[in-house]
Image: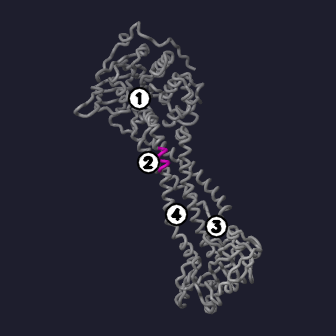
Amino acid sequence: MTLLAARNLMAEKMRFAFSAAGIGLAVFLITVLLGIFQGWNNKVGGFVSEVDTDIWIARDGTTDFINAASILPGAMGEEMLARDDVAAVYPLIVRPMAFEHDGSKVEVHLIGYDVESGVGGPAKIIKGEGDPSGNEIVIDDVLSKISGVGIGDELESSGMTLTITGIASGGNFAFTQAGFVSEETAAELLGMGDLVTFWLVTLEEGADVSATAADIASTTDGVEVFTSGEFASATRHRILDNVLPILFLIVGLAFIVGIAITSLTIYTATIERAREFGIMKAIGFNNRDLYSLVVMQSVITGAIGFVFGVLLTILLSLFIDAAMPAFVILIRPIDVLFVLLATILMAAAAAIIPARRVGGVDPAIAFKG
Amino acid sequence: MMDRRIVLELVGVSQTFGDKVNPTHALRSVSLQVPEREVVIIMGPSGAGKSTLLAIAGALRRPTSGEVIVDETPLSSLKDHALAEVRLQKIGFVFQEFNLLESLSVIQNLELVLAKAGTRGKRATERAQELLRILGVDHRRDARVNILSGGERQRVAIARALVNNPVVILADEPTASLDAVRGGEVMGMLQKVAHDMGSAVVMVSHDHRVLPYSDRVVWLEDGHLEDREPASMHSAEAPTFASTTVQPG
């Protein structure tokens, strides 16, 4: 039956190719959108997750890392450090800002961190030096590619000139990319004095993170306190909550288009072969066999479309990686499995109407010349 | 005849089309008994209901009333899937337009039906190969059926009809699409199938040239069936198929 299903499809090669391509494009669209979602999810929240701390303290009303409209007094660090359950406290200054390089604007998500501990600093140095001091800045690899700046180049803002001394990875937040300087340089550049954006708190071993976070929140006025996981999650949601409905809508539309294309093809192939189905019924095949044949045709179309769509996605992601480094597509095996299930669902749904049509074919049609 | 087993029986079969106001009576209480090894030819004018009779006898259509019994199995109480099983196991069909599956090769057409009946792999290939050899088309086993001649296609169709050792073969105008030589070959084969292999053959035909191959002729007109003597219908001046001897492989 599988052979017959394949041969039936191949009887009209062009139509089959168009159908598989249609499914492939639907699979491609679904996979790309999932890849974008996972890419953003990974990049946007990934940096926060990677920072080696237990608790993030921000100004009351702060929702996430990207929109960090938070200002905290420098003295708060000492207050936190005085607690028995706190092992260390680190300042972090975060603010999006624009620099100039050779007359062009370079937008940077500036992060001033404690260089000595490295907490809040670049995740991985891939080129140059990693511990910026004085007027040095380490920029994210994607920012380097987008803006065309590299080691030795100078960025100017507020009368200060910073020299790029290192290129790092892990600081791409999809819409913006990180530039790392020392906390002192950030404070000078932004006129922050002893103010900071966040206090990062590392707890003593064995301390209960959630309970400590709750206690800090209740005993300190005007702050929002997040565990590291909560803050990473909040940061992801800040971005993704806005785009998720759109992504789901497009995924849904792609799914429907995939069903429509396959359904139309299988239906047309079924109508054209109504007599053949009648003959099969006449010589002893029952409706269930014919349903299987139709579903098999649909599944074969779906399977080839799936392979085509996934290959197209992989090719596109390679191209995008080279051409648009900020546009992150992350394809995980689990997502590919999800798309495979979606394709099988598409194929099965597409076979419903043609299968019903087959069920109604009169086997006596075989006697008509 | 009476000592042979009846493999197909129609008992008071009627078929009415249309509504109660304007009914068309295709068959009116038709009865027929066909024993094994017999070649029965059903003749009659166009529109007499020959194809309807064949469809009912072949479990493809349920009659308005009456009973059809195939190999001692009454069909009226069977559900659709059981009727399909009867068609698969007990009945072989040979159609005017051959009705092979064009996308498959010769042997695959036979293997598909064998597989449906539960015979797969080497056994299926051997069975198919054997029938193709008997019917003289084994040299075409791997050819796509759409490149075969009409005579070759009909031989393959007969082979397909025989794969599951049916008790009865129902043939609808099997020579209508063939020239005289091929028509004669096909009739010779169907006669051989009945006489040597034991299946009954019930054939609908307009073609008087098939009469010499029959054991019995029945005439269907106005929904009524009556026996005719083959000799009475086949005069000395009537055309015959070209004299052809089939040489099985």
Chain under disc 4: A
Q: Is residue A288 above or below residue A129?
A: above
- Which amino acid type is shown beneath numbered disc 4? Leu
The residues tagged by marks 2 and 3 sit, at their Cα atoms, a distance apart of 42 Å
- Which amino acid type is shown beneath numbered disc 2? Ile
Q: Are marks 2 and 1 on the same chain?
A: yes
The residues tagged by marks 3 and 4 sit, at their Cα atoms, a distance apart of 18 Å
Mark 1 highlights which residue? Answer: A367
Q: Is residue A320 above or below residue B118?
A: below
Residue bounds of the magenta highlight: A260-266
Instruction: Pick whichever of labels 2 and 1 is earlier in the sequence.
Output: 2
Instruction: Pick whichever of labels 4 and 2 is earlier in the sequence.
Output: 4
Chain under disc 2: A
Q: Are marks 3 and 4 on the same chain?
A: yes
Q: Which disc number belongs to residue A247?
A: 4
Chain under disc 1: A
Mark 2 highlights which residue? Answer: A352
Q: Is residue A328 above or below residue A280?
A: below
The residues tagged by marks 2 and 1 sit, at their Cα atoms, a distance apart of 27 Å
Instruction: Pick whichever of labels 1 and 4 is earlier in the sequence.
Output: 4
Mark 3 highlights which residue? Answer: A326
Instruction: Pick whichever of labels 3 and 1 is earlier in the sequence.
Output: 3
- Which amino acid type is shown beneath numbered disc 3? Ala
Neighbor class of circle 2 (other Cα within 10 Å; few <14, some 14-19, many 20+) is some
- Which amino acid type is shown beneath numbered disc 1? Phe
Instruction: Pick whichever of labels 2 and 3 is earlier in the sequence.
Output: 3
Q: Can residue B224 be seen at all in this image of the molecule?
A: yes
Tag 3 and tag 1, C-beta contact below 8 Å: no
The residues tagged by marks 1 and 4 sit, at their Cα atoms, a distance apart of 53 Å
Q: Which disc number belongs to residue A129?
A: none
Q: Are marks 4 and 2 on the same chain?
A: yes
